[in-house]
Each structure stands twice: as structure tokens, then as C-alpha cells.
């Protein structure tokens, strides 16, 4: 296993649509997944997409127990999702603060659907489906955006609600 460098906003490859995984249960895929989990944990993240470490594949991981970056977040089991698809189940959108390992030190207020159903595959190619809401849904949507070449600042409606964490924390409860 190895820590990977997380690409930062401005890197052109972060704005590309990632390719689907076609072969499961390969040594390359196993190593990539291990590296992604190790990198996410080391960076204290709650999610990571393969494009963020320079691999243009439709692979996302996410999970959180206790996290200093998201102290009020509900727990989400560590999950690997390959070739994800998302169905929005509730048209209601909820605004909340997001951060990103590719946009370090910044936060922005982003509206996202509150309830979704996601499906995809695990590392062996076995299908999985889950219906989730709240922070779990937000994390999945944020990571799926990455594999579609979208960083959360592109979703902001008001740039006055985007800034450095240490400045925003003095005026908002993040």
C-alpha cells in the first residue's frame, strides 16, 4: 500500500469524465483500492475518487466514524463503489457546507438532493444497491461528481458562501 498525492483544483484531469472499470478483481484494482483507503484515512477525508489521485476510473470510496473535519457527521460504513449510478429519490435539496481534499482549506455551501439510491459494484464485480439520505447522500453525490469531472465549487450558487475554513468558522458553525 502507498499514500498517493491528491491532485488539487486547477489540475486539468480533475475536470474530465472518468472511464468505467471493465475488469474486476485484478492486482492493479486491489492495489489502487488499498492506496485510496490509505490516502483518504491519512488525509482525514470522508471520501475519495480515483481521479483525485490521477487515475481516470469510475471508482469512489467513502466512510466516516469520527472526523475532525466533519464533527457533526453521522457515521457511514467504509464503502467502495465502482461504476456508480445515482437515482435522486426526493426533489428536496438541502444546503450544507462541503470541503474537499482537492480544494484544501476551503468550504462552500452546496445544495444537494436529500435522498438517493445508489448502485454499483464492489472489487469482485458483485452488485450493490443502497438507499440513503442526509450526509451519506451528500458524500456519495460529492464523490460521483468527481468521476464526472465536477468539483464542488462549480455547484456553488453564491460565491459569498465560499471561503477559507478558518475564516468561515468564525461566522458560521461548520
Image: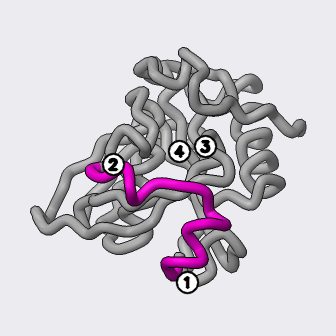
User: How far, Cα to Cα, is label 2 from label 1?
Assistant: 22 Å
Q: Is residue 143 visible?
A: yes
At mark 2, the secondary structure is: loop
Question: Which circle marks residue 130 in the picture?
Answer: none
Q: Which mark is residue 103?
A: 3
Q: Which residue is mark 1?
A: 72
- Closer to viewer: mark 2 or mark 4: 2
Name the residue rendered at 54%, 72% in the picture.
76
Q: Quadrant of residue 145?
A: top left
In magenta segment, residue 156: no
Which region of the structure is painted magenta? Answer: 157-173
Compare marks 2 and 1 and give the one earlier in the sequence: 1
Horizontal side of 157 relative to 144 (left or right) equals left
Q: Is residue 34 above or below residue 128?
A: above
Give residue 156's mark: 2
The image quadrant of residue 67 is bottom right
- First in sequence, mark 1 or 4: give its number: 1
Per the model, the C-alpha gap separating discs 2 and 4 is 31 Å
> Which residue corresponds to mark 4?
122
Amino acid at each position: 500500500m502507498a499514500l498517493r498525492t491528491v491532485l488539487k483544483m486547477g489540475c486539468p484531469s480533475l475536470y474530465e469524465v472518468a472511464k468505467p472499470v471493465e475488469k474486476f478483481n485484478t492486482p492493479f484494482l486491489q492495489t489502487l483500492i488499498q492506496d485510496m483507503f490509505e490516502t483518504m484515512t491519512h488525509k482525514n477525508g470522508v471520501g475519495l475518487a480515483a481521479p483525485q489521485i490521477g487515475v481516470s476510473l469510475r471508482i469512489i470510496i467513502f466512510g466516516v466514524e469520527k472526523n475532525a473535519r466533519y464533527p457533526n457527521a453521522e457515521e457511514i460504513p467504509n464503502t467502495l463503489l465502482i461504476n456508480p449510478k445515482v437515482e435522486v429519490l426526493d426533489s428536496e435539496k438541502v444546503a450544507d457546507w462541503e470541503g474537499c481534499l482537492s480544494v484544501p482549506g476551503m468550504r462552500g455551501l452546496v445544495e444537494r438532493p436529500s435522498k438517493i439510491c445508489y448502485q454499483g459494484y464492489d472489487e469482485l464485480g458483485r452488485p450493490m444497491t443502497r438507499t440513503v439520505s442526509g450526509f451519506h447522500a451528500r458524500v456519495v453525490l460529492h464523490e460521483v461528481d468527481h468521476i464526472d469531472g465536477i468539483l464542488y465549487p462549480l455547484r456553488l450558487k453564491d460565491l459569498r458562501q465560499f471561503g477559507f475554513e478558518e475564516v468561515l468558522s468564525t461566522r458560521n458553525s461548520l
